[in-house]
Amino acid sequence: MRSVMWVLAVLLVAAGSEHRASAQAPGCTKSDFESVVNEAGAALRDLNHKNTPVFQAKLRALKDKRNWSNDQFLTAAEPFVRDETIVGHDQKSEELLVRITGGGQTATSASQADCRLLGELRTALQVLVDTQKEKWRYMMAKIDKELGQ
C-alpha cells in the first residue's frame, strides 16, 4: 500500500509539471488533477486507517482462539493476508498504477488531451480505490468466517 501512496505523490508532482498547459485551458486545470489525486489518496488512506487495526485485532483474536504460538501464527495467518484472490487484487492495483503513471507520458500537450487524461485518471483512480475496498471486504469476510467457526 505504501507504493500506492508513493505513486499518488508522484502524480501530484507530475500534474504540476506535465499539465501546465491545462492550467490555462477552460474546464481542465492543474488543480483538477491535484484534486483527483488528493481525493483518491485520502480514500486509500482512510481505507487503511479504518481497516488495518480492525483486521490486525481479528488476526490476534484468531491466534488466541486457536492457541497458536508466534511461530505457528506466522504460518497459519498467511492465507488470511495472501491467497489467490488477494494476490489478484494486488495485481490489479499494480496494473492500474502502471496505467495511471504511464498515462502522463503518452498525452500530448494539447488541452483536449490533458482533459481526456484527467477523465482517464479519475476513472483509473476510482477503480483502484474500489479494488482496495473489495480486497478489504474479502479479507474481513474470510477472517470473520474463521472466527465464527
Image (cartoon, helix red, strand yellow):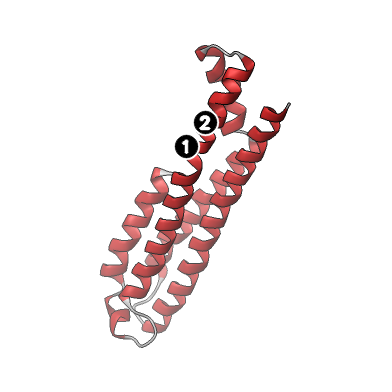
Q: How many numbered discs, if any? A: 2
Residue toward you, 45 or 114: 45
Residue 59 picture location, percent across and down: 56, 28
Q: CA distance from mark 2 to mark 1?
A: 6 Å
Question: Which secondary structure lies at badge 1?
Answer: helix
Residue 29 picture location, percent across and down: 33, 79
**Residue at horizontal 52 percent and vertical 67 percent from the top:** 123
Q: Quadrant of the N terminus?
A: top left
Residue 61 vertical placement versus 104 (above, below): above
> Left or right: 21 with respect to 126?
left
Residue 53's tag is 1
Locate residue 130: give its quadrant.
bottom right
Residue, disc 2: 57
Q: Quadrant of the C terminus?
A: top right
**Residue at horizontal 57 percent and vertical 44 percent from the top:** 136
> Left or right: 76 with respect to 45?
right
Are the residues flagged by discs 2 and 1 in contact, CB closer than 8 Å? Answer: yes
Packing grade of label 1 (10 A; few <14, some 14-19, many >=20) is: few
- Report the amino acid beneath label 2: Ala
Residue toward you, 77 or 113: 77
